[in-house]
Amino acid sequence: MGCVVEKPRARGLMWTQLVVYLVCQALLGAGHAAMTKEEKSQLRVQVLEMFDHAYGNYMQHAYPADELMPLTCRGRIRGQEPSRGDVDDALGKFSLTLIDTLDTLVVLNRSQEFEDAVRKVINDVNLDNDIVVSVFETNIRVLGGLLGGHSVAIMLKDKGERMLWYNDELLHMAKELGYKLLPAFNTTSGLPYPRVNLKFGVGKPEARTGTETDTCTACAGTLILEFAALSRFTGIAIFEEHARKALDFIWEKRQRSSNLVGVTINIHTGDWVRKDSGVGAGIDSYYEYLLKAYVLLGDDNFLERFNTHYDAIMRYISQPPLLLDVHIHKPMLTARTWMDSLLAFFPGLQVLKGDIRPAIETHEMLYQVIKKHNFLPEAFTTDFRVHWAQHPLRPEFAESTYFLYKATSDPYYLEVGKTIIENLNKYARVPCGFAAVKDVRTGSHEDRMDSFFLAEMFKYLYLLFSEREDLLFDIEDYIFTTEAHLLPLWLSTANHTQVKKNKTSQYTELDDSNFDWSCPNTQILFRNDPLYAQSIREPLKNVVDKNCPRTTSRMDEISGNGNRPPLRARDFMASNPEHLDILKKMGVSLIHLKDGRVQLVQHANQAASSIDAEDGLRFMQEMIELSSQQQKEQQLPPRAVQIVSHPFYGRVVLTAGPAQFGMDLSKNVAGCRGFVAKTEPYSGCSEITNTEVIKGKIALMQRGQCMFAEKARNVQRSGAIGGIVIDDNEGSSSDTAPLFQMAGDGKNTDDITIPMLFLFSKEGNIILDAIREYQEVEVLLSDKAKDRDLEGESGEQRSLENDSQKQISKEQSIPQEELVNAKDSEGDSSPISPVDAPHSSDRDHSRNPTDGDLSPEIKQPSNEASQNSVEKSQTPSETPEESKSERWDSKVQPIESILADWKEDIEAFEMMEKDEL
């Protein structure tokens, strides 16, 4: 069966379903599955067991709190834990995880648990809290969760088997919440404030919000599905009207020449605050909701807008297999040299669009990154190095994997899903749930399990391995929101109200070829060549290992001038006359400062041409990235303390600070493994009195009273095989503090041969609590987490697998795994803060970057010439307190001689435009 290829006109619900779902299913019907039904069944049962482990621990240890803290086995209650900044705006004391998980329970055939959960939400959840929450997060997680729960509740009730008592209680709660969000829309533009007080709204003194001026594009543009569904369910049009008005305003403010939108917009004036544009954090779900709004509501305006944006994305942002941010005014100019993990949703959206080839390419590139790092880092560079190291168990890659499997029926994507399952169990599973990965390089954990992990990850994985007969209902009767909540497609004809449409919009007339491939003839694409998807993936198999970033500029490619690749910052030699000539042509000059440093300055109006000016700006941006990277490389990387004894078996990994003395764990593959024991005295600053206890073990000491090197020498003389220094600052955590390195005492430390690591208070308390609970605690000190498949755990796993086989034969699901949970810790919880990521840009789920900026720090220009300068700092970073500041001596190389503390002035870009005018 082929698809319609004409330009879209007004169509009914049946055509809508055809575009989104039949395309997805028909694309490779002739393929032969390599994975048997039995294997798929085993993986499906494994997903159920994993879900039960996560959901069961939330209900046991955290409910009614918003989220579970899986390392300390307790609930995260806002105000009782250290603030994590913007990420906490998702928490509203409304049992977030339970609401977010409602429809997941039905998808996973947990009907009884769903019925129990709905009763708890109705009886226990209070939405009238005096608390400031994110409008975006509350909409997609809570409002979406209530509507998704209502959708499946009425479906079960209609079947006459369950929920017969249900009387639209979840819908009433959704309506109450909808009214509480409406005050945020009290702006002249119609764009909502980023935050709202659930009890007092915005603007009032008691509301403590309403003074913000900016919001992200996704934050304002990801409302239409939930708000329109609320209007269609209730017959109250005001919700859909507000969401449409916000979308209309963003569309009007798009950059007309490029048809792109920026990341951050002023909610009062409509001016773009951040003018970079991509498909990741800050914009992602805006594009998603334009296409899905057309699917759910049948309004051609949304499809026209999406196609206009999509044409621009594929023209400027897509550099297969990469998706790189560009400037909206100069879309040929790449805005940054790294990508964030949230763009992993985009291949799935391309499947819904019908553009399969680039979806396969980008997904394969992401999979290669995952195979290298076990998880997708929050951000990675164009040569696939880690840029931001954390991974909060995001589901976007699993989402795209599911849609690509539906589109191609290629069993390859089942194997990808199997890899996701294995990595989650091996590297994220802990006794009390699944813990976010703080650093994919070391495997260390963070005390965090976001609600979206239960709402999305298990839903997509279960559906990936499910057949139609495995589900209680037809999943194709629903559309997924950005949080994977289910909204029924019949809403397009329910309570339809005439909404005032934007009549001022002018759509760019696109080449009809844009629509030729928007809905492909699936027989031509796949049925005659079952290896189609494989042929696209094959060239990308080694793309990560080869580390081959693009070497020619976008402008060179467009103009056909590829024979003169521009000078790259990494290749620049200050002693090379040819390089100096190229700099001059780009408007970049060298200035020798009195203190011996060399400064690079760019004057865009002195460049030979506008193309050379763009190359010069890109060169300066690369210099900033290179300077930042070299500063990071001057520091030792974080180390890992892995608890390997019962009941942890290596599942708990703590981020540790390194020492500039003692054994170099990066050169010792085996690391240092042993049982831990506290020293007496605990400070370790005098002769150890309990040498019989310390000998042959890893000594625990408290920070303070003497130099770190002195502590190391004392425990080494006592026969310790290693040492861990625990911070004496109660409540400190690696999540909120930068990496701490223990420096020497200014003397020769070659006599110290044992490994020494530093733990902040929170991480140290996890070990101390484990000692109190289990007495004998064994740890592994290493440069990164080792394989968790230890002998003790293997025994438990074999027992679990035997039970699984028995359950499969009975066509029953595995009960929740019985694990001994670690005792609740007294340690404090805190936010993500990877070693190489600025704390201010910590962002939650999709799309919460309102106040965080992914771009480099900006310094305003000092004159009208729009100068961009790079200076090499000769003042290295100092080591932590308790020791003399240690200077790092390094050989001066050509590239280093021209680097400095300079930060990018993005506004120079506009100044360049003015100069050209």
Image (cartoon, grey):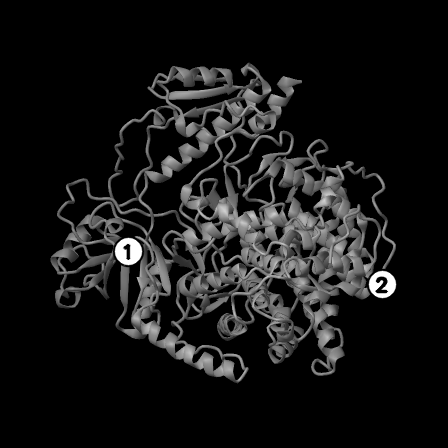
Q: Position of residue 241 (x, y in %)?
A: 80, 52
Foreground: 685 or 273? Answer: 273
Residue flagged by tag 1: what amino acid is it?
A: Ser
Q: Residues within 10 Å of mark 2 (few under 14, many from 20)?
A: some
The number of callouts visible is: 2
- As measured in the structure, the alpha-carbon distance from the residue carrying label 1 to the one carrying label 2 is 61 Å
Residue at x 24% of width, y 43% of height: 883
Which residue is depicted at the point 68% across and 67% down? 475
Residue at 54 percent of width and 16 percent of height: 607
Q: Quick check: 842 left or right of 641?
A: right
Q: Position of residue 299 (x, y in %)?
A: 81, 52
In this rendering, position of residue 882 left or right of residue 370: left
Per the image, the residue denoted by label 1 is: 782
User: Does the image show residue 1?
Assistant: yes
Earlier in the chain: of badge 1 and badge 2, it is 2
Q: Nearer the viewer, residue 60 or 506?
A: 506
Question: Could you tell me residue 11's position as x and y percent?
Answer: 83, 54
Q: What element does badge 1 sit on?
A: strand
Against 581, residue 646 (above or below) is below
Q: Residue furthest right?
A: 498
Of all residues, the one furthest to the bottom in this rendering is 810
- The amino acid beneath tag 2 is Asn
Disc 1 crowd, CA 10 A, few/some/many (<14, 14-19, 20+)? many
Read off the residue under disc 2.
495
Q: Which of the two residues, 334 or 694, is positioned nearer the viewer here?
A: 334
Q: Is residue 810 left or right of residue 915?
A: left
Task: Give above or below for 836 relative to 780.
Answer: above
